[in-house]
């Protein structure tokens, strides 16, 4: 069966910001027609005052509701409109502290006494969390590698009132996540400090993203030999057209939308003016937000901060001189200081509990099990596929048939008063996205649904979000990119080089449109190919316009394949409110007529359970990590059938998880595919199965 070329994109777009500030480019989706005015009229109580209590059990009110304290969005007119839209729902109430009743205090103490060994924490302990590398928006099992954003945030909340925890020691190293997740964690650090406990940061490697997070700590230390690279932010794109030409592969790409960048990696040798404009705007948003935050932290003007950065900051001593960090100390010196601070007088090392162990301490043990009403949380993270591939690895993304089953379970249950759909996805299979969109709309007909965007909700990810009546995004969530790109590989020259022949017998004028990769398209085929892309774009754009209560002309001004930051998307009607998970929860409670100060129980519908493959993969990782990356590439390639709704990039998204040497090894392996009989057969096998073909609706 014929296919179109799949323009494979990285979930975290391989445009990079310095200091691992990765762009997450993705296409857009919109919202249900009935949601715009309803969500805009929501109202919330003013910020409640903080209550300081003498009791050792001081509990953040609504601690079970994740982090509050999001930025209130001002109403701005949508693009193409002369009048301002109704204001979105205000931000959630600020972090509060309240005292547990004596009965609850007694119950908590008893639970701590009888807790199993893996959940016990010694009194006077310091919670030690190391934030580095990739941070997933999904929950993790104990057998999973990497960090989980919801578990990190929950640890901050639990530690805020746990009488056994004296404070937090936060190690911050190079991060591989988007700015949306960083803002969510930073918000929790700020909220935790309101509990009266200390949070001390330690930063051996300092880039823009690491400092942005670390400066929220009450104190910040670095070793005298710390690596510092505060030079500013960059964005970059890579292009493969020249490489493909050298090996005899000619891509034929149809891009619909002036800003459509998906496919450029294959079709172009340089950046288009439109894409340059789009990326420059995104970079301005991120850098401007960084300057605003740092200048506010230090009580200086933005111009002063920018002048300091432009001087080229690579010496950690300069950070101390300018007051950017508290002092220069080694890790053991910081721990010795903390040991004295918590009053530990024995000769043993500092009493600490690490992230992994503390994640196993349940909220129930600490009296945070929530109230009677239940709100379901459905997490959708990663690339979108319709069915599970034989090569699927644990936590391999969004599998539509599985997510649809969960959505239907929630829809049919009467115990859930509302639903939060948490999305962190660059998109994927367009058909799968549409099927999930339909199920989310049906769900929204039965109970309130709020979409909460993390780092990225693009293309298929936004396709899902637009089915919800209300969409909440972080200021720097990447979204939009309402556009279409389709294409196919012409492998004629490659086949000639490897002496491979392919002949087709067909019936029907256009039967070979997607099957014939051994020749260029005929003029009539090329015309049909373009019309098909134009039709796909019109369907995407019109559905987005309907979902966001815009007319087609208004949607066209924000479509054209353009990627927006959450802040810009909100001002153009693609997003309703700015904030994190707590903002989405506050709106969900309001829509479900649950009083804002009433505790609720959050039920994780997508909560993982350890499987044997996951346990085995966790125990025995791969040699140099190369086989894992190869398996991921093969999985992505074999799953790319039909029209895709995803972001830019092809095949290389897995490389970020490898070291430089391992990236080189994998790229050498891929580039030498046609240099041996075995690898040539492997390549031809996929070509014959049309696995390199498909379309991308970005």
Image (cartoon, rainbow, N blue to C red):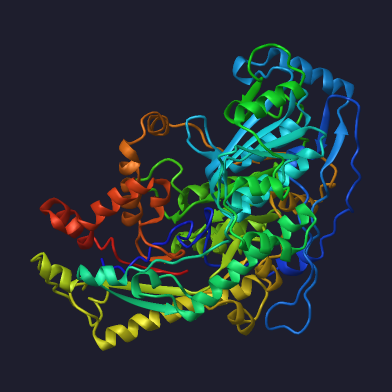
On screen, residue 221 versus residue 593, left or right, reads left
On screen, residue 603 versus residue 16, left or right, reads right
Work out whether 688 lies above or below 137: below
Q: Which corner quadrant of the image does residue 619 belong to?
A: top left
Q: Residue at x 42, y 50 (%)?
A: 656
Instruction: Give x and y (percent) for residue 194.
Output: 82, 39
Q: Residue at x 58, y 45 (%)?
A: 409
Instruction: Give x and y (percent) for residue 612.
Output: 40, 30
Q: Which corner quadrant of the image does residue 188 belong to?
A: top right
Is residue 132 visible to us here? yes
Instruction: Give x and y (percent) for residue 300.
Output: 78, 59
Among all residues in the image, which is located at the extreme left? 499
Q: How many marks?
A: 0
Viewer-proximal residue among 190 and 661: 661
Quarter holding the N terminus?
bottom left
Viewer-proximal residue among 480 and 259: 259
On screen, residue 37 versus residue 178, left or right, reads right
Instruction: Give x and y (percent) for residue 184.
Output: 67, 49
Work out whether 294 lies above or below 337: below
Is residue 164 visible to us here? no
On screen, residue 377 versus residue 659, left or right, reads right
Q: Residue at x 68, y 83 (%)?
A: 80
Work out whether 101 lies above or below 289: above
């Amino acid at each position: 069966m014929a296919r179109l070329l799949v323009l494979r994109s990285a979930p975290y777009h391989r445009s990079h910001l310095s200091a691992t500030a990765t762009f997450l480019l993705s296409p857009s989706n919109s919202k249900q027609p009935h949601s715009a005015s309803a969500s805009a009229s929501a109202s919330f109580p003013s910020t409640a005052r903080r209550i300081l209590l003498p009791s050792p059990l001081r509990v953040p009110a609504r601690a079970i509701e994740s982090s509050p304290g999001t930025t209130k969005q001002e109403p701005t007119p949508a693009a193409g409109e002369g009048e301002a839209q109704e204001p979105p729902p205000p931000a959630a109430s600020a972090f509060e502290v309240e005292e547990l009743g004596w009965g609850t205090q007694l119950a908590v103490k008893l639970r701590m006494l009888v807790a199993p060994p893996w959940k016990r924490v010694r009194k006077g302990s310091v919670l030690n969390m190391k934030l580095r590398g990739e941070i997933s928006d999904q929950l993790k099992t104990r057998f999973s590698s990497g960090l989980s954003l919801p578990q990190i945030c929950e640890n901050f909340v639990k530690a805020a009132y746990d009488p056994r925890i004296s404070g937090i020691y936060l190690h911050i190293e190079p991060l591989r996540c988007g700015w949306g997740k960083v803002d969510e964690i930073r918000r929790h650090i700020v909220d935790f400090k309101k509990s009266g406990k200390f949070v001390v940061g330690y930063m051996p490697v300092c880039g823009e993203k690491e400092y942005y997070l670390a400066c929220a700590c009450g104190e910040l230390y670095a070793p005298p030999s710390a690596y510092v690279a505060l030079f500013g932010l960059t964005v970059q794109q890579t292009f493969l057209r020249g490489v493909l030409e050298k090996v005899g592969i000619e891509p034929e790409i149809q891009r619909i939308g002036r800003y459509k960048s998906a496919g450029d990696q294959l079709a172009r040798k340089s950046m288009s003016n439109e894409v340059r404009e789009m990326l420059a705007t995104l970079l301005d948003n991120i850098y401007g937000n960084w300057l605003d935050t740092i200048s506010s932290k230090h009580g200086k003007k933005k111009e002063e901060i920018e002048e300091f950065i432009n001087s080229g900051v690579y010496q950690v001593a300069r950070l101390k001189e300018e007051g950017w960090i508290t002092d220069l100390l080694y890790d053991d010196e910081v721990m010795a200081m903390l040991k004295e601070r918590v009053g530990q007088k024995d000769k043993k090392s500092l009493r600490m509990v690490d992230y992994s162990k503390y994640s196993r301490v349940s909220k129930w043990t600490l009296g945070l099990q929530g109230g009677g009403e239940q709100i379901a949380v459905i997490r959708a993270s990663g690339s979108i596929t319709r069915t599970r591939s034989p090569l699927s690895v644990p936590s391999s993304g969004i599998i539509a048939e599985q997510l649809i089953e969960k959505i239907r379970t929630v829809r049919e249950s009467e115990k859930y008063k509302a639903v939060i759909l948490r999305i962190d996805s660059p998109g994927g299979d367009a058909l799968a996205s549409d099927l999930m969109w339909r199920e989310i709309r049906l769900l929204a007909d039965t109970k309130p649904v709020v979409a909460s965007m993390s780092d990225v909700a693009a293309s298929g990810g936004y396709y899902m979000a637009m089915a919800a009546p209300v969409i909440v995004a972080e200021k720097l969530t990447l979204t939009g990119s309402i556009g279409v790109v389709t294409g196919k590989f012409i492998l004629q020259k490659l086949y000639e080089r490897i002496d491979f022949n392919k002949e087709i017998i067909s019936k029907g004028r256009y039967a070979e449109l997607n099957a014939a990769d051994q020749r260029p398209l005929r003029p009539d085929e090329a015309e049909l190919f373009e019309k098909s892309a134009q039709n796909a774009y019109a369907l995407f754009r019109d559905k987005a316009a309907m979902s966001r209560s815009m007319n087609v002309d208004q949607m066209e001004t924000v479509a054209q394949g353009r990627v927006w930051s959450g802040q810009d998307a909100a001002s153009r009607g693609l997003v309703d409110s700015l904030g994190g998970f707590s903002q989405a929860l506050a709106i969900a409670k309001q829509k479900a007529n649950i009083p804002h100060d009433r505790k609720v129980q959050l039920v994780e519908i997508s909560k993982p359970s350890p499987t044997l493959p996951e346990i085995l993969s966790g125990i025995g990782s791969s040699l140099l990590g190369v086989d894992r990356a190869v398996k991921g590439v093969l999985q992505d390639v074999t799953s790319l059938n039909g029209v895709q709704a995803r972001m830019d990039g092809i095949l290389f998204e897995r490389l970020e998880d490898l070291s430089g040497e391992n990236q080189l090894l994998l790229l050498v392996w891929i580039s030498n595919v046609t240099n041996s009989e075995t690898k040539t057969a492997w390549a031809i096998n996929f070509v014959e199965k049309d696995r390199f073909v498909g379309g991308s609706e970005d």
